[in-house]
Amino acid sequence: MNFVKTHPARLYAVLVAVLALVAHFVPELPGALILAVAAAVLGTGEAVQRVENAKTNEAATPAPAEPANPFEV
């Protein structure tokens, strides 16, 4: 599970590539099924993008400054 949280974009890319290969090499699949899977893939892509953006924003946010110690000389 930690791998999924660390690399969601890579897993998404592999999943999309596999789905494209299946759609190409299995011509018996109904068009409606392919369109439904394509819509789900787009929704999943949006979720992956939000996760990646959150990780980027977290890394770019500076750490809060520690309060000054009033007892220090």
Image (tube, rainbow, N blue to C red):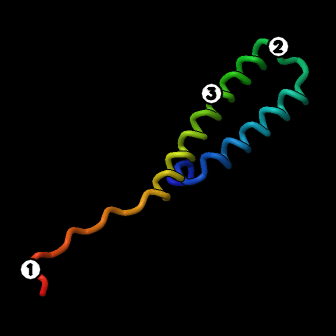
| Residue type, label 3 | Gly
| Residue name at image x 52 percent, y 49 percent | 5
- Which residue lies most toward the left here? 71
Name the amino acid type tagged 1.
Phe
How many numbered marks, from 0 up?
3
Q: Give the residue pinned by disc 1.
A: 71
The circle on residue 49 is none
Q: Which residue is mark 3?
A: 43
In the image: residue 20, left or right of residue 13:
right
Q: Earlier in the sequence, mark 3 or mark 2?
A: 2
**Residue 46, quarter of the rendered image:** top right
Could you give the CA–CA distance between mark 1 and mark 2, rounded to whole angstroms?
Answer: 74 Å
At horizontal 60% and vertical 40% (from top left) the residue drawn is 49
- Considering the numbered disc 2 on the image, is that residue within a helix, a strand or a loop? loop
**Left-right relation of 25 to 69:** right
Q: Position of residue 63 (x, y in %)?
A: 37, 63
Residue nearer the viewer, 67 or 2: 67
Q: Is residue 47 left or right of residue 25?
A: left
**Which residue corresponds to the image point at 71% horizontal and 17% vertical from the top-left?**
36
Judging by the rendered image, the residue that carries numbered circle 2 is 30
For mark 3, give the secondary structure. helix
Q: CA distance from mark 1 to mark 3?
A: 54 Å
**Secondary structure under the numbered disc 1 in the rendered image:** loop
How packed is label 3: few (under 14 Cα within 10 Å), some, or many (20 or more)?
few
Is 6 placed above or below 47 here?
Answer: below
Q: Report the residue at 69% width, 22% height from top.
A: 39
